[in-house]
Amino acid sequence: MPLIDENVRSVGREVRELARLHRELAQAELQEGLRRSAVGFFLFGIGVAIGGLALAAAGFALFFLLSRWLPAGAAAALVATTFAALAAVAYLIAFQVLRGSGSLLLPRTRALLWELLRWQDKPKDS
């Protein structure tokens, strides 16, 4: 009987080791995703600040250019409409880009766990 007891202990050790390795993989994957996201958000913030200043300057320049031929109110409305259209296009592009990003969803860990679940459900030969 000690042979069966030793086999059960061995399987238990292997299962614990497998669970530990999966936890380490999930932690590493999450840290990598968070690090990339933090850098991306930082650069995005800098881009928004500089882009906002550039758009404000461009808006004033466009307003002063258009006010030569149009009344001030019409020039301001045209500039505002142009910027609203640009913002809508930027929103749609950003939505498409962000929809495909799933780095924080732990894709490798999920794939490994799904593979284990499928392996567990396979019919066993008797």
Image (tube, rainbow, N blue to C red):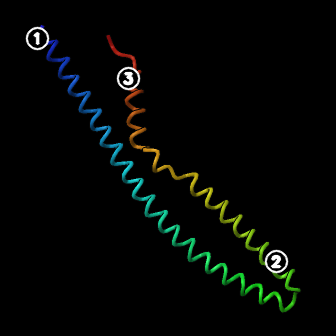
Instruction: Report, in whole angstroms, how far the alpha carbon at label 3 lies from the one at label 1.
Output: 27 Å
Dot 3 corresponds to which residue?
Answer: 120
Q: Earlier in the sequence, mark 3 or mark 1?
A: 1
How many C-alpha atoms fall within 10 Å of the one at disc 1: few (<14), some, or many (≥20)? Answer: few
Side of 51 where 18 appears, left or right:
left
Residue 78 - label: 2
- Name the quadrant containing residue 21: top left
Amino acid type indicated by mark 1: Pro
Residue at x-position 66% and y-position 65%:
90
Residue at x-position 12% and y-position 13%:
3
SS state under label 2: helix
Residue 89 - label: none
Q: Tell me the mark number nearer the camera, choosing from 1 and 2.
A: 2
Q: Nearer the viewer, residue 32 or 118?
A: 32
- Residues marked 3 and 1 touching at CB (< 8 Å): no
SS state under label 1: helix
Q: Nearer the viewer, residue 40 or 53?
A: 53
How many C-alpha atoms fall within 10 Å of the one at disc 3: few (<14), some, or many (≥20)? Answer: few
> Is residue 14 positioned above or below 6 on the image?
below
SS state under label 3: helix
Q: Tell me the mark number nearer the camera, choosing from 3 and 1.
A: 1
Q: Earlier in the sequence, mark 2 or mark 3?
A: 2
Dot 1 corresponds to which residue?
Answer: 2
Side of 115 where 81 appears, left or right:
right
Amino acid type indicated by mark 3: Gln
